[in-house]
Each structure stands twice: as structure tokens, then as C-alpha cells.
Amino acid sequence: MANVNATGTVFNLPNFAGQLYSSTPAVTPFLSLIQSKAVKTDNFQFPTGVEYTLDAASQPAISETASLTAPTAVSYVRSQNTNVTQIFHEKISVTYAKQSSGGRLSGVTSSLDQSCAPNELDFQTARAIEKIARDVEYTFINGVYQLAGNSSQANKTRGMLAAAGTVVNCQNAALTQSVLNSAFKNAFDAGADFTDMVLICGPAVKQKLSAVYASQAGFNLPESRNVGGVNLISLETDFGPVRILLDRFMPSGVLLGADISCIRPVEQDVPDKGNFFREPLSKSGAAEEYQIFGQIGLDHGPAWKHFKITNIA
């Protein structure tokens, strides 16, 4: 049944007996990986790092005579990169009649009769929180940056795919070890140090990754002779170890390399309320109404620490 954009009533939120399941996975692996490093801000625009560059390395050729005169001064200029927090906002509305009709069951009933949602407000609140978590996960990966210029514009936080500075285009060809090695090298050449590098991918690319390395000598020879298959969870590269994270919100045909050491969520609290809080709304009739409000953005660090491979067949 489709969800309804309206107040929950006895008739548009029927109760059913049975075990409760969701066909929409609520796991958020990337958010779970970085949430312990969350920091607070009191400004919706925050810095993601201050950068400077050095000139290309070279061998000096300074004679004794030349050394008697000090060289021309070189001043190193800094630049600041920023991102923004954005609002996540949900409303919960359930009538008094619906709340008082928890014993009314629809569909098939049996001796195992028990409502799958005995408290409608708690059920709707939990689902709203799940939706926000999924939206945050999606945004932290796919978000497109927008800085609001006035109160009618929305701040939109930049996600990891937009933040990745090194891009390797697979040009609709198959993912190969050569393509992966090229991406690793290009990222290293750009400055990535593989401190805590994680490859984030969707299901199809995850299978392709496992297939790339499945034929590696010794890899396809498990200790047990009654176990088959390959599940690649990490790689040892020339530049450091790389973990692999499967995420349903990665777009098809894209592989992201993210240095987790410089990534953290940035939360913006409302004074005396905190962040992602539920509070009652003013009543206009016989219904309980609440809102859940929160502001969060992504500190992704320098672009050159991350890379992506696009257009994988």
C-alpha cells in the first residue's frame, strides 16, 4: 500500500496482525561508519579545510657567491573550502480516533492475533526517523552543493561523489585491475595518503570487484572444500590497505574511494533543544501532531584525498 501524505486516521492506517517487516532497507553503512566523529557548529556554513600548495620539487643550484645575497621571498597563500548543513524535517500526525482504535484489525486474523503496531505514534515516529537516516545517507553520498542566499532558498550539503577530486572514467568498459590500479595511482599522485581509504560501491560494482580479484593466485582456494564463492572485503594496494563498503545508495556504475580519516558529520543544534528532536505542534483539532527537526552536513576534507571511477559497464 502506498504511503499517504495526510493525517493518519482509522481508515488510511489499517492495523494488521503479523510480524512486521520493511521492504525498504533502513541500513545506513556510510553514516554508521562516520557518525561517532560528529562535531557541532553554530554556523550553517563551515570549513572543510584550509589548503596551500608548494612549488614543484627541484634541485637548487646556488653558488657560494650567490648565497651572499638572500633569495626572493616566497609567500605561501592559503585558501579555505566550505560546505553547509541542511535541514531535515518531518511531521507526524495521528487522530485521537486512530490512537484509540488499536484493537481494530484488518486483513487475516488467527489465534496469533496481535497488532503489528500497538502504538501508532511510536510506529510513525520510528518510521520518520528511519526516513531521515536514509535521506542523510543518500545526501552524504550523492548531495549537490548549494549555499542559500536568502531564507527561501535551501542549503544543500555537498556529498562525497561531488567532493572527490580525482576522477577516472571507465568509458562504459568493464572494471579491471588495470583501471583500479590507475585510479589508486592517480589518487596517490594527487596527494591522497591512503590513511584510512574505503571503497564504497553498490551491489553490481561490488560483484565486479570480487570478480576482478577472484582469479588471483591462491585467492580462490578456501581452507574448506565445502565452501564456494568470493566476498572481497579489503584490498592490499601499493599505496596502503583499502577496505570495501557495500552501500545501496551508490549510483550504478560508480566506485568511490573515500579517506575516512578526514570525514565527519557536522551537526547544528537548536538552542535548548539539540539536534534531531521530536516536539509537539500546536493543536487545531482531535489529533496528535509532532515535528522532527534536524540540521546536519558533511565535512569531507580536501578533495584530493578522495577519488571515484565512473561509467563502469
Image (cartoon, grey):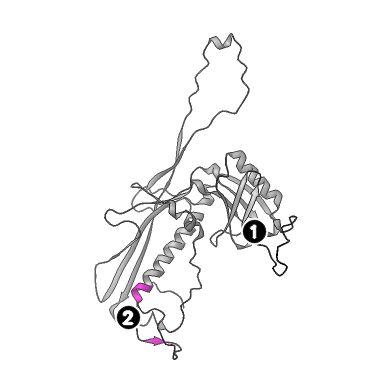
| 149 relative to 283 in the view: left or right | right
The quadrant in which the C terminus is found is bottom right
Q: Main secondary structure of the magenta part?
A: loop
Q: What amino acid does circle 1 point to?
A: Leu
- Residue 7 visible in the shown view: no
- Element marked by disc 2: helix
Vertical side of 192 occupied by 281: above or below = below
Disc number placed over residue 290 in the picture, else none = none
User: Is 135 contained in the magenta span?
Assistant: no
Q: Position of residue 299 (x, y in %)?
A: 45, 47
Disc number placed over residue 232 in the picture, else none = 1
User: In percent of the image, x 31 and y 79: which residue is there?
Assistant: 99
Find the distance from the CA under tag 1 to the CA under tag 2: 49 Å
Vertical side of 308 occupied by 191: above or below = above
* Count of numbered labels shown in the rendering: 2
Q: Give the residue at the far bottom of this rendering.
A: 111
| 285 relative to 7 in the view: left or right | left
- Residue 196 visible in the shown view: yes
Q: What amino acid does circle 2 point to?
A: Lys
Q: Quadrant of residue 118?
A: bottom left
| Residue topped by disc 2 | 98
Q: Quadrant of residue 95?
A: bottom left
User: In percent of the image, x 39 and y 67: which residue is there?
Assistant: 128
Q: Position of residue 178 (x, y in %)?
A: 71, 49
Task: Give 121 or 228, whichever is nearer the viewer.
Answer: 228
Task: Give 148 or 298, whichever is nearer the viewer.
Answer: 298
Q: Which residues are magenta?
A: 98-123
Q: Which mark is in front, 1 or 2?
A: 1
- Element marked by disc 1: loop
